[in-house]
Amino acid sequence: MNRKISLGLCLSLVIITVAATFAVTMVFSKQIYNRIISNISQRSQSYSNVEEINRIISNNFYGDLSAFNSNLSASLGEGYVNGLQDKNSYYMTASEYMDYNRRLNGEITGVGIETLYDYAAGELVVTYVYEGSSAESEGIRAGDVITAVDDVAVNRSNYDALAAFFTGSRLDSVRIEYMRDDVTKVAQPISNFSIPTVTGRNVNGVGYVRISSFGKNTAAELKSVLEDYKKSGLTAVIIDLRNNREGTIKYAANALDVIISNINGSIAIARHSNGKEDVFTAENSNFTQFAYAVLINGGTSGPAELFACDMRDILQCVLIGTTTAGVGTMQEVFTLDDGGAIMLTTALIIPRAGENAVYDGVGIAPDANGEITLPVEDANISLLDEADDNQLNAAVNLLTEQMN
């Protein structure tokens, strides 16, 4: 049955609705107003401080101000991000971002060597020569001491700048003078070798895999090395994540997917501050038949820590070395209009084992007989002879015992 209401009652309901809507709107408006005023006040103070600093510098600085304007934008960007006091968030100039992107996408070319400056001996030492590189064909070997680059003598103050010549534009060449057994030699390799993130070799019947970072090509490179080990009949593999600091969680998860079989649930969750979660899964493994050990140290950071943690928790592989850096967060890149970028921490990483296995701020401890230290600092691992690498030898011995 239809019922009619009086005109007076209808008007009353309209008035009540309008009043209620107005009240709610006023509450939200007041909150927004207070927030805006607070920000305006803070921003006004910041702008005032910058203007005051600029006035003082312009009127009093004794020096060259010609590069001031070009440097100011980068300095402000760097200072703004540094204000977060998060060591994993940082500002990149356009050139720094371009270099970062090239490394991440596997676009770095070079003559095919890795070097490290031995401060104790005062020497720039070749620590690794990539198989198939121009440096290898020119006869350069690990252990050679580089004395000059393009006729400039190497010393403690310039070695870093000179080592930069070993990577660069494709087909550029560099003249390298080096010593081996007190004999001076000269080579002129070409920068035509694509530097991989994954390398491998056979160590006393055990497959050894070094992953230097987690980039776009890491999963494919890892798969290729493991396929070779599988064909050659190896049954145990060491994965070296020591001093692996760069890459993304996504690419680390892709590399895990190469090894770990299809499992229920996630291999990692990235939880953002707003509650949103990015879920990473494993689906395509072909290599669970290997026995694994993973080498870690204080330079194992971020994506490499997730890889090590999940290898332990899912495949029960042993972690050997020292406690990792404790960067259990995810970083993302946000590009800027000037070509620069901001690397920003955006989420907490929750590994396969769940909340109790979160390692941010504490790191991941090794499993086998506690920490195994080395006779050199972490940064100098590549200067070690294989016989002196206690961590590597412990992993070889452990896996050899399992195979027997």
Image (cartoon, rainbow, N blue to C red):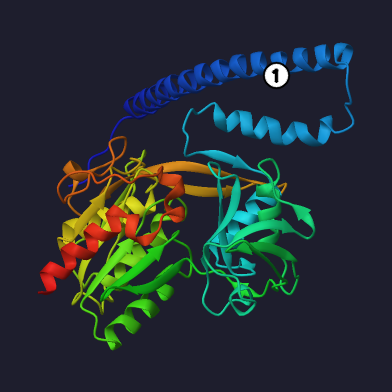
Percent position of residue 272, x then y: 36, 43
The extreme bottom residue here reads 231
Figure quadrant of the C terminus: bottom left
Q: Which is nearer the eye, 379 or 140?
A: 140
Quick check: 16 above or below 231?
A: above
Q: Which residue is mark 1?
A: 47
Residue that appears at 69% across and 73% down: 189
Estimate the x, y position of residue 225 in percent, counting from the top left: 37, 77
Q: Is residue 278 left or right of residue 125?
A: left
Q: Going 76% across and 31% down the picture, which residue do you hit?
A: 72
Near-viewer residue (318 or 258):
318
On screen, residue 109 versus residue 270, left or right, reads right
Eyeballing the image, is 357 above or below 209? above
- The amino acid at mark 1 is Tyr
- 54 to 219, vertically: above or below: above
Number of labelled discs?
1
Q: Could you tell me if residue 390 is visible in this image?
A: yes
Q: To which quarter of the image does residue 170 belong?
A: bottom right
Query: Is residue 133 left or right of 337 when viewed as pictured?
Result: left
Residue at 32%, 26% in the rendered image: 9
Q: Determine the secondary structure under disc 1.
A: helix
**Other residues around mark 1 within 10 Å, as few (<14) / some (14–19) / many (≥20):** few
Across and down, in percent, residue 114 comes to 55, 61
Asked whether residue 351 is in view, the answer is no
**331 sits to left or right of 67:** left
Coordinates of residue 102 in the picture (x, y in percent): 61, 62
